Image: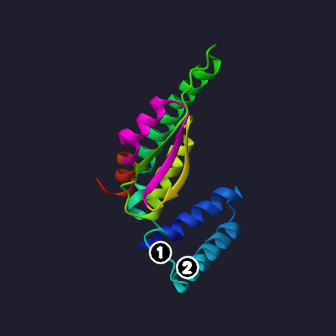
């Protein structure tokens, strides 16, 4: 099943990038996608992390939530920047990731970094060192809402 999904995704990506839908280009896309699927099978890299079928269904939900969090944080950072007294309280904090895979931990760390006002400064095992522009931002990361969302996105509740 993973190989079929991978082949379909690769073909869709090929078609999206080509922008032309002639029989020849569709045929080339099918051939190249099939070759890539067979090559990944032969190299034995066709595991759950390579083709995360369980995650695909949650992509729209998680990304829409993440986009909203990015927008809220960007608004807060913009307010801080234009405030005459520049009310920042930079701090570092360490949080534990509850994700079970390296991909889940990377998704969590990158989600923190994508949110304005916070940056994942380091990852050691399941411990993330996070820089926050404000104390409130650090407390939000420590509260664990994003950790729960990424865990749900990863397929664990």
Q: Nearer the viewer, residue 11 or 43?
A: 43
Residue 90's image quarter? Answer: top right
Q: Residue furthest bottom?
A: 42
Q: Nearer the viewer, residue 143 or 93?
A: 93
Whether the magenta-drawn stretch holds residue 141 is answered as yes
Is residue 6 positioned above or below 131 on the image?
A: below
Whether the magenta-drawn stretch holds residue 138 is answered as yes
Query: In this rendering, would 155 be left or right of 60?
Result: left
Q: Residue furthest top?
A: 84
The span from disc 1 to disc 2 (Cα, nearest Å) is: 9 Å
Residue segment shown in magenta = 126-147
Cβ–Cβ under 8 Å for marks 1 and 2 = yes
Total numbered labels placed on residues in the image: 2
Q: Position of residue 75 (x, y in %)?
A: 55, 25
Looking at the image, is mark 1 or mark 2 earlier in the sequence? 1
* The disc label shown at residue 3, or none: 1
Question: For the point 54% across and 64% down, which residue is it?
Answer: 9
Question: For the point 41% across and 58% down, which residue is it?
Answer: 55
Question: Which residue in the protein does label 2 denote?
Answer: 40
Q: Residues within 10 Å of mark 2 (few under 14, many from 20)?
A: some
Residue 19's image quarter? Answer: bottom right
């Amino acid at each position: 099943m993973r190989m079929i999904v991978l082949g379909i995704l690769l073909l869709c990506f090929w078609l999206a990038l080509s922008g032309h839908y002639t029989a020849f280009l569709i045929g080339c896309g099918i051939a190249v996608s099939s070759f890539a699927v067979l090559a990944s099978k032969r190299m034995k890299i066709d595991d759950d992390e390579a083709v995360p079928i369980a995650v695909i269904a949650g992509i729209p939900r998680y990304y829409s939530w993440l986009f909203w969090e990015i927008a809220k944080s960007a608004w807060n950072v913009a307010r801080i920047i234009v405030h005459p007294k520049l009310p920042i309280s930079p701090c570092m904090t360490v949080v534990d990731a509850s994700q079970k895979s390296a991909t889940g931990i990377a998704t969590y760390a990158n989600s923190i970094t994508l949110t304005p006002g916070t940056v994942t400064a380091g990852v050691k095992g399941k411990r993330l060192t996070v820089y926050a522009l404000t104390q409130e931002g650090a407390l939000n990361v420590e509260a664990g809402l994003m950790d729960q969302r990424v865990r749900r996105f990863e397929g664990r509740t």
